[in-house]
């Protein structure tokens, strides 16, 4: 007799309010991998985004963005939705889980290091944070090494499989730079972004108009700040994108010469790891988490070394053999991503959690 189909509720808060975050993309990867095997429902605090395909099964409970509403969403809305659809499991990708819920709670940590915020948390943010930690104390925390092992990649199988190829994200056709370009995704750290702009100024002094730097801005305010920071001549070497959708980010990534990552790699993988799966090499800092995730497909330099980072950017533009070697490494590592293995492992984890 075949096993009864699992019912799993996915917390989609990040898809609405942090749609370019590692949390949101990890959630999409879970949905894409499991949707044929598991009865999945996506819980959203707002109407379905225009970039999400119609076949995605979802439930909407409207909640505007605030710490209080996130608290109510996690502690009240999600358990109620799970009860209504008879879901046995609630899976979270951001830190926060209900204190009182009869369902099995599964949490896969996805967050980057917190960006610098020069302010104190308000009362509801502190309450949400405290209750979230309490909820997670009874949630099953899923670490990538349990699946990927020390190598960060699953065992090789016959057929490679890349995320999102079945179309849960609708296609996007952004206006791309006319020249080859490097892509950088900002997470709201102005000091880090200013460092990159300084490096790019040194780089363009050598490359001229051979390449551009495309920046996915954290917000419209950051986009405006970059414009105010740059001279008109230097600004011509940049292409800024703000308030874009996940499919647009994927399209920008697919067409980039290389992805620039100066931050640590999130536990379940960030844009750097998604770049590798698209055959796009990564240029960045020699950080343990980043090196482990991208391996030989990365051109990594000592942290905070402006000259070395600029030299790396110049090298992949002027030395075609170096770029092609990095691309071949990225393609090879991309082939190691196996959705069937991931699907089997996560499904078994849900069943073990329910049986315990």
Image (cartoon, rainbow, N blue to C red):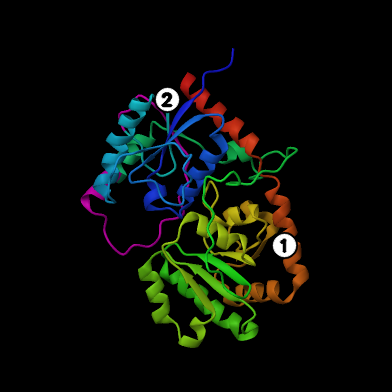
Residue 143 visible in the current orientation = no
Q: Is residue 314 magenta?
A: no
State the mark number for residue 238: none
Q: Quadrant of residue 131?
A: top left
Q: Which residues are magenta?
A: 99-128
Considering every residue shown, the one lying at the far top of the view is 1
Considering every residue shown, the one lying at the far front of the view is 54
Q: Is residue 107 magenta?
A: yes
State the mark number for residue 326: 1
Image position of 149 (left or right of 194): right
Q: Earlier in the sequence, mark 1 or mark 2?
A: 2
Q: Is residue 224 above or below residue 16?
A: below
Q: Position of residue 113 (x, y in %)?
A: 45, 55
Crowdedness of circle 1 by 10 Å Cα count: few (<14), some, many (20+)?
A: many
Q: CA distance from mark 1 to mark 2?
A: 44 Å
| Quadrant holding the N terminus | top right
Q: Residue at x 33, y 31 (%)?
A: 81
Residue 103 visible in the current orientation = yes
Magenta stretch prevailing secondary structure: loop
Q: Residue at x 64, y 35 (%)?
A: 340
Q: Position of residue 282 (x, y in %)?
A: 63, 62
Q: Nearer the viewer, residue 72 or 266?
A: 72
State the mark number for residue 88: 2
């Amino acid at each position: 007799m075949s096993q009864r189909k699992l019912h799993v509720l996915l917390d989609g808060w990040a898809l609405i309010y942090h749609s370019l975050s590692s949390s949101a993309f990890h959630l999409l990867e879970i949905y894409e991998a499991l949707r044929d095997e598991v009865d999945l429902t996506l819980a959203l605090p707002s109407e379905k985004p225009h970039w999400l395909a119609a076949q995605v099964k979802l439930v909407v409970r409207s909640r505007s963005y605030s710490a209080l509403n996130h608290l109510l969403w996690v502690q009240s809305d999600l358990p109620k939705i799970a009860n209504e659809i008879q879901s046995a499991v609630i899976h979270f990708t951001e830190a926060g889980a209900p204190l009182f819920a009869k369902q099995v709670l599964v949490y896969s940590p996805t967050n980057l290091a917190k960006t610098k915020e020069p302010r104190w948390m308000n009362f509801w943010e502190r309450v949400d944070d405290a209750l979230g930690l309490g909820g997670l104390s009874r949630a099953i925390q899923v670490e990538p090494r349990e699946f990927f092992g020390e190598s960060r990649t699953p065992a090789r199988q016959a057929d490679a499989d890349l995320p999102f190829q079945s179309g849960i994200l609708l296609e996007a056709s952004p206006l791309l730079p006319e020249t080859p370009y490097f892509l950088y995704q900002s997470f709201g750290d102005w000091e880090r972004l200013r460092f990159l702009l300084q490096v790019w100024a040194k780089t363009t002094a050598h490359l001229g108009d051979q390449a551009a730097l495309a920046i996915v801005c954290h917000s419209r305010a950051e986009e405006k700040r970059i414009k105010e920071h740059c001279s008109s001549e230097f600004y011509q070497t940049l292409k800024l994108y703000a308030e874009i959708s996940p499919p647009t980010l994927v399209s920008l990534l697919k067409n980039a010469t290389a992805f620039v990552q100066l931050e640590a790699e999130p536990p379940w993988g960030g844009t750097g790891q998604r770049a590798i799966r698209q055959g796009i090499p990564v240029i960045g800092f020699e950080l343990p988490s980043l090196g482990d995730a991208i391996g030989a497909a990365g051109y990594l330099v000592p942290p905070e070394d402006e000259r070395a980072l600029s030299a790396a950017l110049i090298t992949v533009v002027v030395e075609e053999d170096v770029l092609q070697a990095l691309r071949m490494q990225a393609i090879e590592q991309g082939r190691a991503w196996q959705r069937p293995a991931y699907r089997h492992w996560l499904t078994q984890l849900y069943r073990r959690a329910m049986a315990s």
